[in-house]
Each structure stands twice: as C-alpha cells, then as structure tokens.
Image (cartoon, helix red, strand yellow):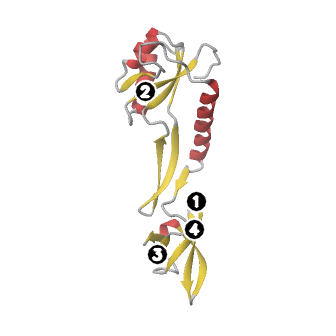
C-alpha cells in the first residue's frame, strides 16, 4: 500500500484506548469493502515491541506509543471522514478547532519521525525487542540459582541485550563481581 501520490496526507484519528488494532482492521476492511483504496492508502499504529522479564521468563509484547490514536494516510473528503468515523470505537479525526472543520494533516517532518520509529521498531522486534529489566544499578539482590545461590549483593552493571548483570557479592570479606542471568536473582 505505498504509492507516492502527493494528494495523500497523513491524519491523526482518535479512537478508544486499547482498541487501536481493531479500529485499524475495521477501517481497512471497510475501505476494501467499499472499493476506496484509491482514497485511503494506509493505516498505521505507532507500536513498540518490548521484552520484559516476568517470573523469570522473557515475555515479548507490543506497546502502543500513542494510546488512543492511529494515523491514516488518505485523500481527505467528507466520504472518507464519514467512513472512518463510522467505524466502531473510532471517535474523530483530530483537528485544532472544536468545530467541524477539516483536520490538518500531520506535518511531513513529524510523520517521517514516526515512520522511522516504526521502521526502527520492526528491526528491533526482529532481534527480540526492547528489553526492560526490573533491576537497577545499586539495587540489592539475592542470587537464587547457580554457584552463588543465597548470596546477597548489589547490582553493579546490567547487560540488557544479553539479559545478564554483574552483581557485587561479598565473598571472604571482599566485594567480588559475579555475572549472572537476570532470571537467577530476585530483589530483596
């Protein structure tokens, strides 16, 4: 769905938070059903793929960066407005005024940043997503598995891509750096 027709502009459409994916699907279905692909070219959700540690397991999920909003690339007119705003869970085209005037398209530079972020996110997602580790440098932890089980220490360094961290544990009265998997420690 990517032709370079200069009449197409990106618009922000407000929808119910948490319903962005279903609104996107419904808009695309409606456009296809009515044969209006020549007026609505694309629908975009600004997503980020995040990998988190939950109960010792890696969990990957998609997070909407702009909750309650989607982007529609269209040639705006009354017909397009009515089709899109009639979709279930869709609220309105975003415009600067509270009246019923036509919405202003998203500035090209701003939309390019969003498109780049979505493209970058797709590359990151292919590599396993953005990793969030529930520990911070300086936090006290207890090792729960491995050779240093039951040792307590302080997080010294975190390696998010490897899902590992360096913990300083007290061995024979000296702080000794130990590298462990993030699933092998718990907060204390």
Q: Position of residue 161 (x, y in %)?
A: 60, 58
Return the residue at label 2: 14
Q: CA distance from mark 4 to mark 2?
A: 41 Å
Q: CA distance from mark 1 to mark 3?
A: 19 Å
Q: CA distance from mark 2 to mark 3?
A: 46 Å
Kind of element beneath mark 4: strand
Marks 4 and 2 close (CB-CB < 8 Å): no
Up-down relation of residue 176 to residue 22 (above or below)? below
Return the residue at label 4: 165
Up-down relation of residue 3 to residue 137 (above or below)? above
Question: For this view, does 29 lie left or right of residue 3?
Answer: left
- How many marks overall? 4
Kind of element beneath mark 3: strand
Question: For this view, does 59 lie left or right of residue 127?
Answer: left
Image quadrant where one finds the C terminus: bottom left
Kind of element beneath mark 2: strand
């Amino acid at each position: 769905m990517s032709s370079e027709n200069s009449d197409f502009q990106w618009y922000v459409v407000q929808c119910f938070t948490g319903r962005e994916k279903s609104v996107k699907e419904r808009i695309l279905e409606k456009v296809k059903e009515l044969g209006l692909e020549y007026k609505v070219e694309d629908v975009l959700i600004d997503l980020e793929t995040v990998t988190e540690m939950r109960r010792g397991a890696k969990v990957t999920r998609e997070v909407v960066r702009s909750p309650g909003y989607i982007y529609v690339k269209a040639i705006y007119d009354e017909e397009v407005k009515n089709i899109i705003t009639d979709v279930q869970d869709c609220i309105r085209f975003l415009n600067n005024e509270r009246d019923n005037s036509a919405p202003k398209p998203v500035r090209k530079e701003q939309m390019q940043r969003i498109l780049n972020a979505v493209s970058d996110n797709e590359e990151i997602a292919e590599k396993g997503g953005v990793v969030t580790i529930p520990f911070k440098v300086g936090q006290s932890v207890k090792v729960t598995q491995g050779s240093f089980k039951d040792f307590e220490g302080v997080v010294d360094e975190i390696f998010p891509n490897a899902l590992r961290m360096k913990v300083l544990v007290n061995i024979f009265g000296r702080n000794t750096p130990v590298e462990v998997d993030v699933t092998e420690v718990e907060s204390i």
